[in-house]
Image (cartoon, grey):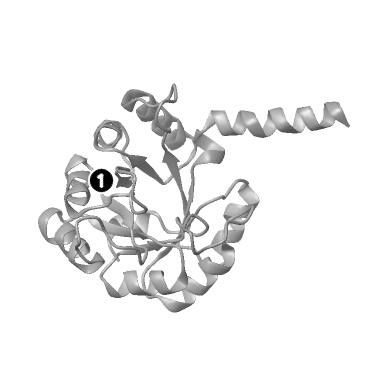
């Protein structure tokens, strides 16, 4: 087992990302968020964009899953082979990319992109999937990890209130690579359930690192109570 993957076994990965136009959309801010997550016990960090990845890699001694959100097409998470190689060269140990059945903007297959990352950079690949079939296909294409990241975020899947633990369990039974639970994990209990469902590791982002959303949860609850 690869040493980076082994360090994530049954552990928490914290996604340190901010959306465009937000006050925290700044590489140094994300570096500080990653440092805080590491201090809290995170075993790995997931980060977006070469600048953030480079800043975090220089400051945090943890496995780093990197991606690059770019473009307006359906496939925008590390959408091309060149994006994937750039993410690895910025310092990511693992390159996360869209591994859905949707066509990639550069016309390459998933297998071709995975092979390019392996051969040109030596980095690992995490396949962000939406369905069981996509996860199986990604493992067959050479992905080192398979994630449930995009379950509920495609036109052909349904978004639930919480994580898709059923998909986690089915993937864990179907593939021979580690399965990463990601997407709508909002409580420690849900994170624990994901491990019990068969996840190798759990990625949590919004509930830890997105104060705008967290504030909205509390503000909504207070408003509901005040109007009751």
Residue name at image x 38 percent, y 43 percent: 45
Residue name at image x 43 percent, y 30 percent: 33
Nearer-the-camera pick, 159 or 72: 72
Label 1 packing within 10 angstroms: few (<14), some (14-19), many (20+): many
Does residue 109 lie above or below 203 as drawn? below
Residue name at image x 26 percent, y 71 percent: 141
Q: Is residue 189 left or right of residue 129?
A: right
Q: Position of residue 176 (x, y in %)?
A: 37, 75
Q: Position of residue 177 (x, y in %)?
A: 36, 70
Q: Residue furthest top?
A: 23
In terms of secondary structure, where does tag 1 sit?
loop
- What is the total number of numbered labels drawn onto the structure image? 1
Q: Position of residue 69 (x, y in %)?
A: 32, 43
Q: Residue furthest bottom?
A: 174
Q: Residue furthest right?
A: 228
Does residue 201 lie above or below 175 as drawn? above
Q: Which quadrant is home to the N terminus?
A: bottom left
Q: Is residue 93 left or right of residue 212?
A: left
Nearer-the-camera pick, 160 or 10: 160
Nearer-the-camera pick, 206 or 36: 206
Q: Quadrant of residue 218?
A: top right
Does residue 17 lie above or below 13 as drawn? above
Q: Is residue 71 left or right of residue 116?
A: right
Read off the residue under disc 1. 92
Q: Position of residue 52 (x, y in %)?
A: 30, 33
Q: Which quadrant is home to the C terminus?
A: top right
């Amino acid at each position: 087992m690869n040493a980076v993957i082994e360090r994530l076994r049954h552990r928490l990965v914290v996604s340190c990302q901010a959306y465009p136009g937000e006050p925290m959309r700044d590489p140094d801010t994300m570096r500080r968020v990653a440092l805080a997550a590491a201090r809290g016990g995170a075993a790995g960090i997931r980060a977006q964009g070469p600048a953030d990845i480079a800043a975090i890699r220089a400051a945090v001694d943890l496995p780093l899953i990197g991606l690059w959100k770019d473009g307006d097409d359906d496939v925008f998470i590390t959408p091309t082979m060149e994006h994937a190689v750039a993410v690895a060269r910025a310092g990511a140990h693992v390159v996360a990319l869209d591994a859905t059945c949707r066509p990639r903007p550069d016309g390459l297959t998933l297998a071709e992109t995975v092979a390019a990352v392996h051969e040109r950079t030596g980095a690992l690949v995490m396949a962000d999937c939406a369905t069981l079939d996509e996860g199986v296909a990604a493992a067959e294409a050479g992905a080192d990890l398979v994630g449930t990241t995009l379950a509920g975020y495609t036109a052909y899947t349904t978004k639930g209130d919480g994580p898709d633990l059923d998909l986690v369990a089915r993937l864990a039974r179907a593939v021979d690579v580690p399965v990463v639970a990601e997407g709508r994990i909002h409580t420690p209990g849900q994170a624990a359930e994901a491990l019990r469902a068969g996840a190798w590791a759990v990625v949590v982002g919004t509930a830890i690192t997105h104060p705008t959303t967290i504030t909205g949860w509390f503000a909504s609850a207070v408003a509901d109570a005040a109007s009751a």
